[in-house]
Amino acid sequence: MDHHWVAKAWLSDVGLPQYSQAFHNHLVDGRLLNSLTRRDLERHLNITKKFHQALQARRIQCEHQNVDPLVWTSHRVMKWIKDIDLKEFAESLLSSGVHGAVMVLDPTFNTDAMATALGIPSNKHMVRRHLVEEMKTLIRFSPKARNGRDLSCHSSYGSLPREGRDQTPPRAEGSPIHGYTSIEVTNV
């Protein structure tokens, strides 16, 4: 985002075209826009109305919320990937074309497609399962998400959905599961 775009298009889009000249004169580009404080807005750009300053503060605040992934850029998706502890795979999204609208609206885009875009090897079952759970949680919050959309992995290592786990019937009192106090994990 260069300073011409910020001054002409972005300010007009957010309803503040009156500040276009000041932003253009001070060469405010996307990187500078991201780091502006209320004091900078007031002192250097002559934005004295508190409401207009609050707009900038709300924009920064929204960058840290997982409210509507539909409008996320690919860089915001990368930030989310880092936030869910998959930072070693985040850089793979740089030229992948994956952004929020793809994640939410494309019915063919599921966790397998995301794992492929991230470059997660198919033998990393725990990492892929973690991605499944995080994507389900994220897409559930999106107001535009399709109901009944299958986000799960289509491989043999998929897990039961959370809803299915909660509906399991209770074990009978004489069941062997009640007789064991510990579990032994062996090589399978």
Image (spheres, rainbow, N blue to C red):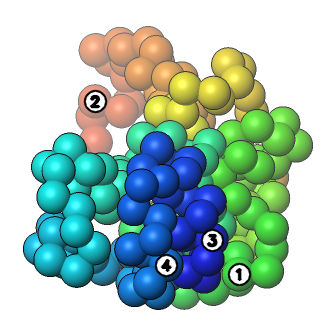
Mark 4 and mark 1: Cα distance apart in space: 29 Å
Q: Earlier in the sequence, mark 3 or mark 1?
A: 3
The amino acid at mark 1 is: Leu
The circle drawn on residue 5 is 3
Q: Nearer the viewer, mark 4 or mark 1?
A: 4
Residue picked out by circle 1:
94
For badge 3, the amino acid type reads Trp
Q: Which residue is mark 4?
A: 24
Q: What is the quadrant of the C terminus in the image?
A: bottom right
Q: CA distance from mark 1 to mark 2?
A: 51 Å
The span from disc 3 to disc 2 (Cα, nearest Å) is: 66 Å
Q: Earlier in the sequence, mark 4 or mark 1?
A: 4
Mark 2, Cα crowd under 10 Å, few <14 / some 14-19 / many 20+, is few
The reply to whether dot 4 and dot 1 touch (C-beta < 8 Å) is no
Q: Which mark is residue 178?
A: 2
**Distance of label 4 from label 2 (alpha carbons):** 72 Å
